[in-house]
Amino acid sequence: MSRIVMKFGGTSVADLERIRNVARRVKKEVDAGNQVAVVVSAMAGTTDQLVGWVEEASPLHDAREYDTVVAAGEQITSGLLALTLQNMGIPARSWLGWQVPFKTDDVHGAARIKEIDTTNMRERLEENVVCVMAGFQGIADDNRITTLGRGGSDTSAVALAAALDADRCDIYTDVEGVFTTDPRIVPKARKLDKITYEEMLEMASLGAKVLQTRSVAMAMNHGVRVQVLSSFTDTPGTLVVDEDEIVEKQVVSGIAYANNEARITLVGVDNTPGIAGDVFSPLAEGNINVDMIIQNESEDGLKTDITFTVPQGDVEKASKILEDAGNVKFEKLISDNNVVKISVIGVGMRSHAGVAATMFQTLADKGINIQVIATSEIKISVLVDSEYTELAVRALHTAYGLDGE
């Protein structure tokens, strides 16, 4: 007998028929003799509707009341699934964040989990009751409802799996697993049987929307074996596991791209000690996430150009912060939203040379100019013009031998 946490996203529970489909999947695990806890998202579109109502009611809303409203979506789904399971003759009950309890800090709208008391839930699981948990929500020390941020149900599921010492956490989505790249761009993309936590973390942070980044980090920290599956097919999914579980590591496991980046270049900055700190400190204070950075000195060493990337939605804010920063002098500021970050990812890079050279040569052969380069131990990212997105991804996918039949 295994203890399994099953998580179903919004498209998987979009209506009553899909909730019945979820119940049938849960029943299979129960019939196999497993203890099952289920974490559910709100029905597709519900959270957006609730957020819209909050903003219409009060544009400058109280974050605590925001959480009270938007947490209702998961509450509805958990109750409906519990009722459906009961109607199928399966003992089940729903659990809200405060009933577990899922204790969080008091950062409403983006709460972080501090502790999960699973005593009562464990007792019900031992009685073979299916525990249906409303994802995305918790409770702060002042007993106010909190939410974990968009995509937080993945985090709820992994955290619950860790707290319950579950054998596995199955994340059901509208895709069949983790692919070597976006199948919509590369029809020859292959589904991976296994991928390491580190690779999945890089892919999630670089544009792959299969799993939420925070949930992958939590799974890695707590050693939770995660499986990504489709709610709509019965094909095997992708296991996200520790590197030790993968015998033969691919040099490159996948190609990811992020088209929500923008490039900012400060031209003619005085090249003095501490200038980088003067540029990036006010951006950090403004909660702007800076990613790729490159700095070029002039021939005489007196001036430098600093180029970096920020989320597209933060370009105007970042530009204003830098223009208002009295201790940062530059000749002009240039921003460009028409860029894409493309990354090759693989734990095998640690022991193989030539990965970067292959990437650069492949892009050069296609006439694609690289604007910025950033590397880590298992990732190489480049910034290129967005019009070359599909060409670059397809060429790199082929160059690293990732194409399927």
Image: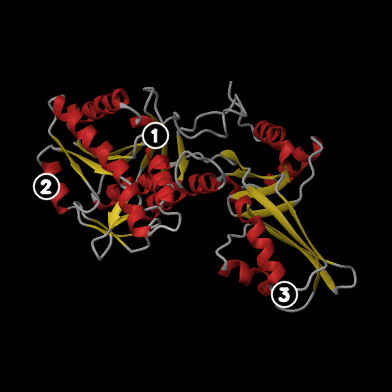
Q: CA distance from mark 3 to mark 2?
A: 59 Å
Q: Is residue 10 left or right of residue 285?
A: left
Q: Is residue 86 visible?
A: yes
For residue 378, the mark is none
How far is mark 2 from mark 1, CA to CA? 31 Å
- How busy is the neighbourhood of tag 1: few (under 14 within 10 Å), some, or many (20 plus)? some
Query: In this view, which residue lies farthest toward the right?
Result: 300
How far from the left and from the top, in percent, is residue 368?
A: 78, 40
Nearest the viewer among 2 and 313 is 313
Where residue 104 sits, quadrant-wise, is bottom left
Of the two numbered discs 2 and 1 in the rendering, the one whose residue sits closer to the viewer: 1
- Viewer-side residue, 102 vs 49: 49
Mark 1 and mark 3 lie on one chain; the one further toward the N terminus is 1
Q: Are marks 3 and 2 in contact (CB under 8 Å)?
A: no
Q: Quadrant of residue 344?
A: top right
Q: Amino acid at mark 2?
A: Glu
Q: Determine the residue positioned at 29% across, 44% down.
A: 72
Q: Which residue is mark 3?
A: 275
Q: Which residue is mark 2?
A: 123
Rendered location of residue 375, percent (x, y)? 65, 54
